[in-house]
């Protein structure tokens, strides 16, 4: 369980750093390749990156209180 927690919080930290580096997308792209497409060729990575960035923008527009209550609106792929 400890290893699972360490992996989760390590990824959270790395994704936060990668998203903070935007508009440069190199770090985020590398994270997606390592964590989402680990061990396989990344199909249409640019499309997936666009999806991630659109979701981030959509989440920014939502009230923090709504998000804390679990009221999340996701943008359709």
Image: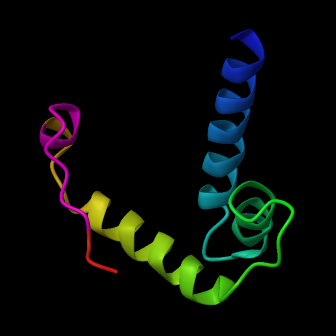
Residue depicted at 61% across the width and 47% down the height:
16
**Looking at the image, residue 5 lies above or below residue 20:** above
- Is 67 magenta? The answer is yes
In magenta stretch: residue 51: no
**In this image, 29 relative to 55: left or right?**
right
Dividing the picture into quadrants, the one containing residue 6 is top right
At x 21% / y 41%, what residue is drawn?
Answer: 67
Q: Quadrant of residue 76?
A: bottom left
Q: Indicate the quadrant containing the N terminus: top left, top right, bottom left or bottom right.
A: top right
Q: How many marks?
A: 0
Residue 68 locus on image (x, y percent): 21, 32
**Above or below, 9 relative to 2:** below
Query: Is 17 displayed left or right of 3 in the figure?
Result: left
* Quadrant assignment, res 10: top right
Q: Residue at x 25, y 64 (%)?
A: 74
Which region shows up in magenta?
Answer: 66-74
Main structural element of the magenta stretch: helix, strand or loop? loop
Q: Residue lying at the far right in this picture: please name it.
A: 39
In what quadrant of the picture does the C terminus appear? bottom left
Picture residue at 28% right of the left edge, 67% below the top: 58
């Amino acid at each position: 369980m400890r290893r699972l927690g360490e992996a989760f919080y390590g990824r959270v930290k790395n994704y936060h750093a990668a998203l903070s580096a935007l508009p440069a997308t190199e770090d985020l792209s590398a994270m997606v390749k390592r964590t989402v497409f680990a061990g396989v060729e990344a199909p249409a990575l640019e499309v997936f990156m666009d999806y991630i960035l659109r979701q981030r923008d959509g989440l920014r527009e939502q009230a923090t209180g709504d998000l804390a209550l679990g009221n999340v609106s996701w943008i359709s792929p």
